[in-house]
Amino acid sequence: MATSLGSNTYNRQNWEDSDFPILCQTCLGENPYIRMTKEKYGKECKICARPFTVFRWCPGVRMRFKKTEVCQTCSKMKNVCQTCLLDLEYGLPIQVRDTGLTIKDDMPKSDVNKEYYTQNMEREIQNSDGTRLVGQLGKGPGYSDMLLKLARTTPYYKRNRPHICSFWVKGECKRGEECPYRHEKPTDPDDPLADQNIKDRFYGINDPVAEKLLKRASTMPRLDPPEDKSITTLYVGGLGDCITELELRNHFYQFGEIRTMTVVQRQQCAFVQFATRQAAELAAEKSFNKLIINGRRLTVKWGRSQAAWGRDKDGVNEVGMKLEPVPGLMQPSEDTPANYFNLDPSTSPAVMNMPVLPPPGIVPPPPPPPGFGPPVFHSVGNPPPPPMSMRPPGQIHYPSQDPQRMGAHASRHDGSYNW
């Protein structure tokens, strides 16, 4: 037991005893099966000055020993790790989290008011059974676009490195590679990150790390929708080998109807085409720089118009695939409209001007004399299709639509067709 516990000996009933600490994944280390030392009432909390159970452990090989710095009551009030005091959900400083959620800290800083506030919060924590957040954090909104953009998706084990060897800085360290401390140049004293205070981080004021992250958030890029309203496709990159089409569909279906979804495993990307432009804009807004699936942060961009795919430099598309022209098919030119190859029938002239053909097995009769009604189609088994002269006027887009191109010709004699 610690020999000095300050002025808290008169209120021993409020001392904290726990069986396991509240830690983030970074402070715990890669291996969760580690050995910890437990010291009951080992130190005073650096925030509320109450004695609490201190845990000490080594998070991994060639890492420094770590210990809990604040009690569990203070940790639950702010939903932070007991060691690094970073938010357990986003891995960010309290100042950044409160700014993103527009929460104002109302915790008093004087000794008497702080103790009274802590006792009330501890009572509220016991009544909530640990199922929900307490205080201002529990009343505030639980979603913020800025926090999702800045949040860490993987542990940052670099924080567990040993401290810099002061003997090596002086040129007097004789341990060499056996020295458990780092042999590196120390941080510049004028660097703002060199002056960090645990109380400032807990109260969310004057935190240099938080100020750096907030400055980064203000300069983060945005995804503006393209001017071409016919584009309803989003490009999703960085899929890896662990993300399937079903997982992508489960995320994007909430924004609107999905027309097609194409996954290119070789390039580890996908193309999601929505039925409406409004759904595509909503998906881009909610997914840009904050789409995380299976722990991977995915890249979301707007797709390109169908005409632009054929105008890429050297015939290479967005995913790096070589595009070879198909013999006989119409190729886009500089005068081709941007939405000419759009799949939407309401906006594509290629579909609007497509000739309407009779169903298979139906042969149109000869044109009636003037004054008679429209022709009536008669089923005569499986005769060949009518010649191009009998079809409604329209532009030919494919070689199969022109029998003359295939080397055949049609002639009509006495009401029959000879091929």
Image: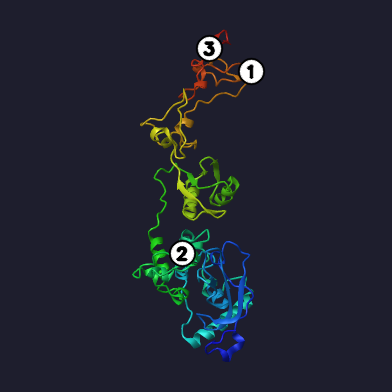
Between 349 and 372, the residue placed more toward the observer is 349
Q: Left or right: where does residue 55 sit relative to residue 281?
A: right
Residue 244: percent from left, percent from top? 59, 46
Please name the residue that numbered disc 3 is placed on: 410
* 240 up-or-down from 11: above or below: above
Q: Earlier in the sequence, mark 1 or mark 2?
A: 2
Where 319 falls versus 175 (above or below)? above
**Crowdedness near tag 1: few (<14), some (14–19) or many (≥20) residues, C-alpha within 10 Å:** few
Q: Which residue is mark 2?
A: 176
Quarter the C terminus occupies: top right
Estimate how packed mark 2 is, as few (under 14), some (14 to 19) or many (20 or more) residues with alpha carbons within 10 Å: few
Q: Position of residue 300 (x, y in %)?
A: 47, 49
**At 57% from the left edge and 92% from the top edge, which residue is drawn?**
10
Q: Nearer the viewer, residue 353 or 309?
A: 309
Q: Position of residue 370 (x, y in %)?
A: 50, 16
Pointers 2 and 3 in contact (CB under 8 A)?
no
- N-term mark: 2 or 3: 2
Q: Secondary structure at mark 2?
A: helix
Kind of residue indicated by mark 2? Gly
Q: Residue 40 is drawn in which quadrant? A: bottom right
| Residue at the disc numbered 1 | 382
Q: Quadrant location of the N terminus? A: bottom right
